[in-house]
Amino acid sequence: GGSKAASLHWTGERAVSALLLGLLPAAYLCPGPAVDYSLAAALTLHGHWGLGQVITDYVHGETPIKVANTGLYLLSALTFAGLCHFNYRDVGICKAVAMLWSL
């Protein structure tokens, strides 16, 4: 039960990391909405799992863990919503990074 779930989670983390490695050149070579939204999802999930590990390592006690995890889910949801809003209403992640590189 728990061991299999942990193994699947670990595999998912590695898959998202590998996906991000592929999305970076894709963002440069063929920017567009599909890559923008894929980056929004992958970056949010990657950050969510990373901060979840920080909570696991450094937050102790039942109530503080519940509060921290609730804050993490709220932060992740707002991050994803913000990135999607940026992709839809503004230039998108790919073009924004290209604009920063052109400075």
Image: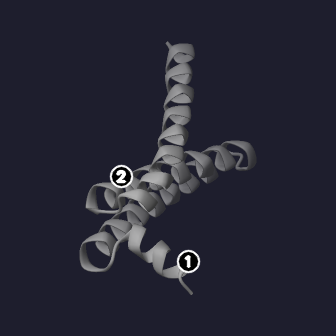
Query: Residue 88 bears which disc, if any?
Result: none
Residue 101, quarter of the rendered image? bottom right
In the image, residue 83 above or below residue 12: below
Residue most toward the bottom?
Answer: 103
| Circle 1 crowding by C-alpha within 10 Å: few under 14, some 14–19, many from 20 | few
From the top left corner, tell me how far across and down residue 67 is, in percent: 55, 56
Residue at 62% in and 44% down: 62
Residue 68, quarter of the rendered image? bottom right
Q: Nearer the viewer, residue 49 or 69?
A: 49
Q: Say whether disc 1 or disc 2 marks the residue closer to the N-terminus.
A: 2
From the top left corner, tell me how far across and down residue 40 is, in percent: 39, 58
Residue at 52% in and 51% down: 48
| Amino acid identity at mark 2 | Ser
| Amino acid identity at mark 1 | Trp
Contact (Cβ within 8 Å) of mark 1 with mark 2:
no
| Kind of element beneath mark 1 | helix
| Kind of element beneath mark 2 | helix
Instruction: Please state the total of marks drawn on the protein image.
Output: 2
In the image, residue 102 above or below residue 44: below
From the top left corner, tell me how far across and down residue 8 is, in percent: 49, 22
Q: CA distance from mark 1 to mark 2?
A: 21 Å
Q: Which residue is mark 1?
A: 101
Residue at 47% in and 48% down: 45
Q: Which residue is mark 2?
A: 38
In the image, residue 16 above or below residue 32: above
Between label 1 and label 2, give the one nearer the viewer: 1
Residue at 30% in and 80% down: 90
